[in-house]
Image (spheres, coloured by chain):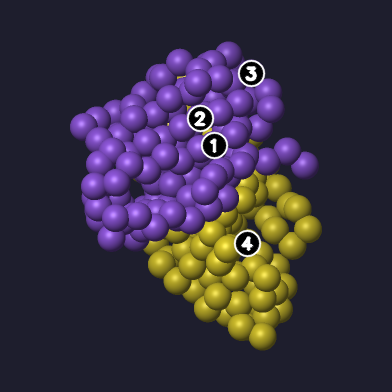
Chain colours: A purple, B yellow
């Protein structure tokens, strides 16, 4: 039963500290997404990659957030410096390319990283 | 512009009742996908179903069924004989695969099933 894995599952940190979240997509999925979930904004897309290349990071605050895919089995999301307003659940999702050869079809989500910035 | 509306914020039912969760969407594309995801209290997002815009057949999977009606831009989800384990937040989502991979989520409907 293939799943997206995320680490850590929970993170408590102090304002100003660097936070790194990691994601292992499902083997064979070439599209990887980062979402953030908050009570106020709901689920919002931060960034995504296809074949490790960034396609859209328009939802991400550029000054403090960065997303990378060092290899096909690892995606990272970093926040530096972190702020209390970054407190949220961060989800990674992965999906295969669609039959159209364009966008991915179904996105499968990891368990999320619950981040609290004090 | 794409938009997904889940007007029901919270629904409470007693076990064994049937319950329908509403989803209304807006899109200019003729090719799109609709999804339902379940978020149980543990927090993960579980994929339930994907429906292609060209396939208006209703789908049934056990106690779950989905009614897709393009005429009313709706993709409603019915749970028959609800159980306590169905308690969760349910999200409807839309994607336009010829434009972007982005999923547009509704605000979710919290379903509470009481014993």
**Residue at horizontal 59%, vertical 16%?**
A100
What whole-number distance in Å separates the C-alpha atoms at marks 1 and 3?
Answer: 25 Å
Give the residue pinned by disc 4.
B78
Dot label at residue A23 = 1
Res A108 visible:
yes
Mark 4: give few (<14), some (14-19) or many (20+) Cα within 10 Å: some
What whole-number distance in Å separates the C-alpha atoms at marks 3 and 4?
Answer: 29 Å
Q: Are marks 1 and 4 in contact (CB under 8 Å)?
A: no
- Circle 1: element type: strand
Q: Nearer the viewer, mark 2 or mark 3?
A: 2
| Quarter of the figure with residue A72 | top right
- Circle 2: element type: strand
Dot label at residue A99 = 3
Identify the chain of the residue marked 1, using the numbered disc in the image.
Answer: A
B115 left or right, relative to B97: right
Q: Where residue A108 sits in the image (x, y, percent)? A: 60, 39
Identify the chain of the residue marked 3, using the numbered disc in the image.
Answer: A
What whole-number distance in Å separates the C-alpha atoms at marks 2 and 3?
Answer: 24 Å
What whole-number distance in Å separates the C-alpha atoms at marks 1 and 4?
Answer: 33 Å
Res B92 visible:
no
What whole-number distance in Å separates the C-alpha atoms at marks 2 and 4?
Answer: 36 Å
Sequence-wise, the earlier of marks 2 and 3 is: 2
Asked if badge 2 and badge 4 are on a common chain, one would say: no
| Quadrant holding the N terminus of chain A | top right
Residue A101 lies, with reference to residue A95, above or below; the image says above
């Amino acid at each position: 039963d293939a799943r997206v894995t995320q680490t850590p599952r929970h993170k408590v940190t102090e304002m100003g500290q660097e936070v790194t979240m990691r994601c292992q997509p499902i083997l064979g999925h070439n599209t990887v997404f980062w979402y953030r979930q908050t009570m106020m904004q709901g689920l919002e897309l931060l960034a995504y990659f296809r074949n490790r290349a960034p396609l859209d990071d328009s939802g991400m605050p550029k000054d403090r957030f960065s997303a990378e895919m060092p290899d096909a089995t690892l995606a990272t999301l970093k926040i530096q410096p972190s702020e209390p307003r970054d407190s949220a659940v961060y989800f990674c999702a992965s999906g295969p390319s669609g039959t159209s050869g364009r966008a991915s079809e179904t996105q499968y989500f990891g368990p999320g990283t619950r981040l609290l910035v004090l | 512009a794409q938009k997904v509306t889940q007007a029901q914020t919270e629904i409470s039912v007693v076990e064994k009742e049937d319950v329908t969760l509403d989803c209304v969407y807006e899109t200019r594309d003729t090719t799109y996908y609709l999804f339902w995801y379940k978020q149980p209290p543990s927090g993960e997002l579980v994929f339930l179903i994907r429906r292609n815009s060209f396939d208006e057949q209703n789908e049934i999977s056990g106690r779950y069924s989905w009614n897709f009606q393009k005429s009313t831009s709706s993709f409603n989800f019915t749970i028959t004989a609800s159980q306590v384990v169905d308690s969760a937040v349910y999200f409807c989502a839309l994607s336009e695969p010829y434009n972007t991979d982005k999923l547009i989520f509704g605000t979710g409907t919290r379903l509470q099933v009481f014993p």
